[in-house]
Structures are given as structure tokens and as C-alpha cells.
Image (cartoon, helix red, strand yellow):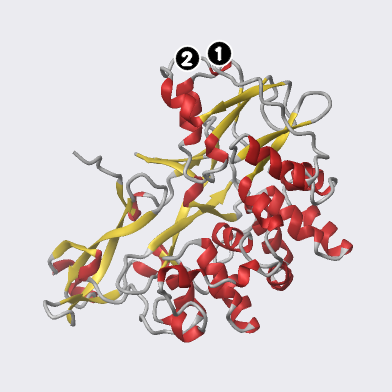
Amino acid sequence: MAAVTPRVFVSHLSGVPVFDPNGDQVGRVRDLVAMLRVGGRPPRILGLVVEVISRRRIFLPMTRVTGVESGQVITTGVVNMRRFEQRPTERLVLGEFLDRRVRLVDGHGQGGEEVTVLDVAIQQLPARRDWEIDKYFVRKGRGGALRRKGETLTVEWSAVSGFSLEEHGQGAENLVATFERLRPTDVANALHHLSPKRRVEVAAALDDDRLADVLEELPEDDQVEIIGKLAEERAADVLEAMDPDDAADLLSELPEDDKERLLALMRPDDAADVRRLMSYEERTAGGLMTTEPIVLRPDATVADALARVRQADLSPALAAQVYVCRSPDETPTGKYLGTVHFQRLLRDPPFTLVSSIVDSDLVPLPPDTPLPLVTSYLAAYNMVSAPVVDESGSLLGAVTVDDVLDHLLPDDWRETDLADLHGETGLHGEEGVGRGGR
């Protein structure tokens, strides 16, 4: 039987406390941020507006929410304290959906009886952190003095009109909603072929995490253009959301003054990772690596390792192995002990210590290893990721095969129309994108 995913009415979230993993209160929920979508698809919940102790209202993405329980919200503990600013493509659920007059959809898909939205239910999608609006609690009647006398009922999201975008709209809001269906690579391909003005408009309308994923797939010229058009604080937020190696590559293309201003606006830990990567030559293991591989201590178990590998935001290359190191377990780590491959994790009992199954025979890469040797290493050992270790034996990061390919392919490889692989058209122009992009 399929697992039942949580459903919460938003009125029950208003004012509830938000806690970090240690049980310390971060603030209280004041609203939810939603994005309308095309094709009658239910609005997606992007995150929460949280009022912190200083009375400042900040944005907490749903990807940072690990639990919505009775009377409380639990976060990952990673919170951006910059003031929340609503974007044109965003809707506030408590502020804009409740008490709104809409119509029920009749059997022919047309607007029927007028109702008032009293509450909205959201539900988490199975096996994901994404949340969508699931149901509406509505009251029949015209409101005013008669409002309390009308019949109330709970209906599916599809039974209410007015909460989705027109399929053929050409505004940035419609393009963003259409792009939600696509992989970051395909969004980047579509974005690249828009006019410069529309490209910047659509990029500015994407949420930080989505824009970060897309920027990583764009040519350098487009990356520089887009990041240069964003407000500096927003640009710093997006750079924080990017993989450190991609953020370092992008910042390296900017003028020195711009680069330093953005690094100063980033969180100190994120900025430190990026600065460390920028200290290496570009076409070396140190310049190619990411500083965020899966690192476990020797006393971790196979079950611990599999839990880390299952994280949805990990790339397949990074999830293919874990690296066992002594404390500290953030890069640069304590002494690197070896690698445990994903297939080995599947063969051993959950209680097995990773230190007992570690592969210590594979020699790690020094950070100054040139790109041709990195390529030969991955090919010779059939690896999709390789550890990078300094002279003291500390793990600095990992080089993944996708980053190696980025530097081996011609500079214009992103111009290739991947839609041709599937016989698809319509990604290369605003008209095609507005129709759904597939």
C-alpha cells in the first residue's frame, strides 16, 4: 500500500513556530509562497514567509523544510536571513488566496457557482520535498451578511477556477511555469535562445535554487550576463545555491571588484569554499573538484551511508561513492582513509561499519593533477568520481565525470539542440516555449 503523504490546511500553519534541528526556535510562519502553473496543474508551494526574532520576514524554501508536524515546522537549520521580497511570479497563500471569490468548475469545464475560499490544503508529493496545493475549503454564497449561512465544502484543486495560468501566455510568469516541467539542461537551452531582454526577465523570475541549477548549465557569457543583471544580494543568494565549483567558475569570469563584492555578500562558509577552489588552476583536479562530496567518519554504518546517498539533491556521480575520513568530516577533512562504492554498500548488512569495507588501494588525486591525467584516471578505474587529497592526507573534494566532460567538450557544445535526440521541437523561441516547450 502506498504511503500516505502529509496534508496540512494553511490556516493551521499561520503563526506556528519554526525550529532548527537542535530545537532552537528560528521564528514563526506568517505566510506561504506559491507559484501558479500552466495547464490546470495545482499551484506549487515554493516556501514559507517566516518572521524571525528581530521581526524581519525571511523566505524559507520548502527544500529546507524537513517536517511539518502538529504545531511546528522543522528546518534543516540552513536559513538565509535576508529580508523576504515577493517576486512577480509569486503569490502569498494566506494574503491572496483566502477570502478570494472564485467559481466552481462545472461538468463542462466552465465557471459555475461562485464561492469564497476559506482555507487551502497543501500536500507533500511522495518521495520528494515538493509541496502542492491539494484542496480548497470553500463557502457557497456571495459573502457579506449571508456569508456565514452558506454551505461549506472541501473540493479538489481542479474543481476551482482562477488558480492556474493560461497555457498560451507569453509573460515571464508563464515561461517560468512552463519551464518547471523541464530539466535544468533543457531550461538552460531554452533560455539561451530567448532574446537577451526576455532571458534576463525569466531568469529573475526563477527561484534561487532553480536559477542556480540552470546557471550551471548555461554558457559562460549567459551566466555573466544574468548574474550581472541581478541585484547584488540576489546574485549572492544564487551563488550560494550553486555547486561551489560552478560558482567559482562563474565568479572567475567577473571583474575583480564585482567578484569581491559578491564574495563579501555570501555566507562566510560558502565564500571560503569558493575562494579555496579559485586558488587552484582551472584545468586541474583542484580547479575541477566540488567541495561537497559525501564524507563519513569511520564509525558510520552502511545504513548511515545509504541514508546520505538517498538524498534527492545529490547528483548521480556524487551519490556513487562515499569517502571515509577522520574528523573533521567537512572538507578539508581529517585523514582520508578510503572510498566505499555504492555497489559495496548494497552488498553488506546495514550495521556494517564503513571502515571495515573501505577501498584504500585506490590512490587519490593530488589537487594539481592536470586534466588529461584526471581523465585517464577516471577511465582506467571505471570511476564517475575521484577523491582529491592534499599532501597532509586531508580530503579536499571530489572530481566528478560531468565536470571533466564540461572541460573536454568544445566551447560551443551547449549549442547542441538536445531536443533533436527525441525528435522534439519548440524549445528555441518564445512562441514554442509559451506552448509548453515540448
Q: Which of the 4 image quadrants contains residue 247? A: bottom right
Res 35 → quadrant: bottom left
* Label annotation for residue 302: none
Residue 58 on image: x %, y %: 58, 55
Whether residue 141 is visible, yes or no, is yes
- Residue position for label 1: 356
Residue 271 visible (yes or no): no
Frontmost residue, 36 versus 58: 36
Amino acid bearing label 1 = Ser
Rendered location of residue 336, percent (x, y): 70, 23
Quadrant into which the C terminus falls: bottom left
Name which residue lies at 51% across and 67% down: 186
The crowding category of the residue bearing disc 1, from other C-alpha atoms within 10 Å (few below 14, some 14 to 19, many at least 20), is few
In terms of depth relative to the viewer, which is nearer, 61 or 384?
384
Mark 2: which secondary structure? loop
Q: What residue is shown with label 2?
A: 352
Q: Compared with residue 149, is residue 199 higher up or lower down, i.e. above or below?
A: below
Determine crowd level at label 2: few under 14, some 14-19, many 20+ residues with C-alpha closer than 10 A. some
Residue 68 drawn at (x, y percent)? 39, 42
Horizontal side of 148 relative to 400 (left or right) equals left
Label 2 sits on what residue type? Thr
Residue 159, how many percent across, how many down?
20, 69
- The mark tally for this picture is 2
Q: Quadrant of the N terminus?
A: top left
> Which secondary structure lies at badge 1?
helix
In the image, 286: left or right of 83?
Answer: right
Q: CA distance from mark 2 to mark 1?
A: 7 Å
Residue in the image at 54% along x and 46% along y: 315
> Do the numbered discs 2 and 1 sit on residues whose CB atoms are within 8 Å?
yes
Residue drawn 36% across the image and 65% down it: 43
In this rendering, is residue 7 above or below 413? above
